[in-house]
Amino acid sequence: MATAPYQSALDLARSLSDEEQARLVQELSSKPTSTAKRPVSILDLAGLGAELWQQMDAQDFVRSERASWPD
């Protein structure tokens, strides 16, 4: 069942001229929707968690990781 705001918008859209309805459809169809998914890129992860690494020396981290490996 349609919600009141949706139904009001639909009724208003139906009262528009054919030209206005076509313009409205064009504008609404070019608007990205929240369900549209864009491709995921590894670059989106750039800088993620940077605050976790600020106080850590990279070389010390690598040494400790390598030390944890089994022989």
Image (spheres, rainbow, N blue to C red):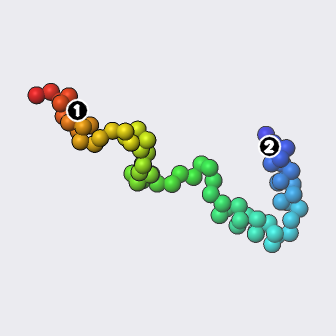
Give percent across and percent down for residue 49: 43, 42
Look at mark 1 in the image and give the residue it sits on. Answer: 64
Please state, as top left, top right, bottom left or bottom right, where the N terminus lies in the image.
top right
Precedes in sequence: disc 2 or disc 1? 2
User: SS of the residue at dot 1?
Assistant: helix
Quarter of the rendering containing residue 53: top left
Q: Nearest the camera: 48 or 36?
A: 48
- Residue sitting nearer the eye, 44 or 1: 44
Q: Residue furthest left?
A: 71
**Please, what secondary structure does the residue beneath circle 2 have?**
loop
40 displayed left or right of 31: left
Q: Which residue: 76% across, 69% down?
A: 23
Residue 66 shows in the view: yes
Q: Residue at point 81% right, 69% down?
A: 20
Residue appearing at x 40%, y 54% in the figure: 43
Image location (x, y in percent) of residue 28: 71, 61
Q: How dense is the environment of label 2, judged by Cα within 10 Å: few (below 14), some, or many (20 and up)?
A: few
Count of numbered labels shown in the rendering: 2
Q: Is residue 49 visible?
A: no
Which residue was labeled with disc 2? 2
Question: Residue 48's spot in the image, x, y percent?
Answer: 43, 45
Provide residue 16's location: percent of width, then percent of height. Answer: 86, 65
Query: Which residue is rendered at x = 87% and y = 57% of the image?
Result: 12
* 27 in relation to 65, above or below: below
Q: Quadrant of the C terminus?
A: top left
The answer to whether residue 26 is above or below residue 38 is: below
At label 2, the amino acid type is Ala
Q: What amino acid is found at the position of numbered circle 1 in the picture? A: Ser
Report the Cα–Cα distance between label 2 and label 1: 60 Å
